[in-house]
Image (cartoon, helix red, strand yellow):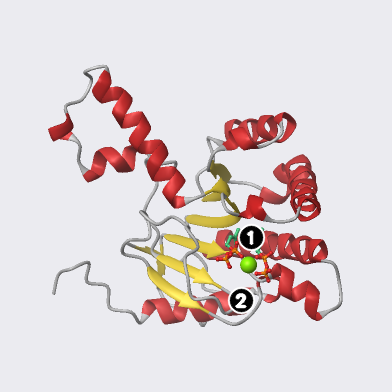
Amino acid sequence: MAFMKKKADSANLPEMLPTHVGFIMDGNGRWAKKRGLPRSLGHVEGGRTFKKIMQYCKDIGIPYASFYVFSTENWKRPQNEIDGILKIMREYLDEVQSHLGDGVRAIFLGDKSAYPDDIRQRMIKLEQDTAHHSRLTVLLACNYGGRDEIAHAAREIAELVKSGQIQPENITEQTIAEHLYTAGLPDVDLVIRPSGELRLSNYLIWQCAYAEYYFTDVLWPDFSPEELDKALIDYAGRGRRFGGV
Ligand code: IPE
Ligand code: IPE
Ligand code: MG
């Protein structure tokens, strides 16, 4: 799906922009290491980039932007790194309304139950407070894993079968999509992964089935609107066929 850009000030941008851009915000640790800094400072800097890129998506008229914040696998990291990330999340959630600005709706993707109660409550409140906004929808994948999401959907659908609300032969792709964390939201058109890794790392695996991929060696804290422009220009030149001719 494509979307008409809103602003002509990014003169180098193509007319047709993707509807949903997914960002795998990778490379914070390496960014810090290169500077002899603790990994946690890489995450702080990565958070600044997140704000800048989110604002830019809003300015140029991208309607959906998703960000991989923390994966179900990231709990394997050292406790002090996890604590550092939770601290940044708390700070963000406290001041988030002000950086989201007008018109931004926030939705969390993933299992919130793994988070401490105060963080979980703040996530729910933010979703409620911004539910009526529609200029830019920001999807924040926190304790998110694509396989975990599909297993969660399977459990919900199994319950419906068990209670006789749905027959197994009536389960379609649409049924599954409606039970994902992204129910009602568009599939990903363009995935951007900085930091040189060429993989999805369990990010929106169902929703990326027909996405275009853009990889760059730039580390996430160094990612910029100019880098995003490059990805959008590259995307505009792709031929998307979805299995057709
Ligand atoms: C991404 O940066 C942030 C999270 C996964 C939370 P990394 O911390 O993975 O950075 P690298 O890959 O070690 O450089
Ligand atoms: C993916 O990055 C998760 C996030 C960016 C939140 P990782 O750094 O965890 O991925 P791998 O381990 O390199 O696959
Ligand atoms: Mg990484």
* Residue at disc 2, CB closer than 8 Å to ligand 1: yes
* Residue at disc 1, CB closer than 8 Å to ligand 2: no
In the rendered view, would you say 157 is above or below 39?
A: above
> Label 2 belongs to which residue?
195
Q: Residue at x 57, y 57 (%)?
A: 68
Q: Is residue 41 left or right of residue 114?
A: right
Q: Amino acid at mark 1?
A: Gln
Along the line of sight, the residue nearer the viewer: 164 or 234? 164
Q: Is residue 94 left or right of residue 2?
A: right
Along the line of sight, the residue nearer the viewer: 242 or 137? 242
Q: In the picture, residue 187 is in which quadrant?
A: bottom left
Q: Quadrant of the N terminus?
A: bottom left
Q: Amino acid at mark 2?
A: Ser
Q: Residue at x 13, y 75 (%)?
A: 245
Q: Residue at x 75, y 46 (%)?
A: 86
> Label 1 belongs to which residue?
55
Q: Earlier in the sequence, mark 1 or mark 2?
A: 1
- Asked if one can make out residue 224 in the rendered structure from this viewpoint, the answer is yes
- Characterize the local packing of mark 1: few (<14), some (14-19) or many (20 or more) Cα atoms within 10 angstroms: some
Residue 228 in the image: x percent, y percent? 56, 74
Q: Is residue 107 left or right of residue 172?
A: right
In the rendered view, would you say 229 is above or below 167?
A: below
- Asked if one can make out residue 10 in the rendered structure from this viewpoint, the answer is no
Q: Secondary structure at mark 2?
A: loop
Q: Which mark is residue 174?
A: none
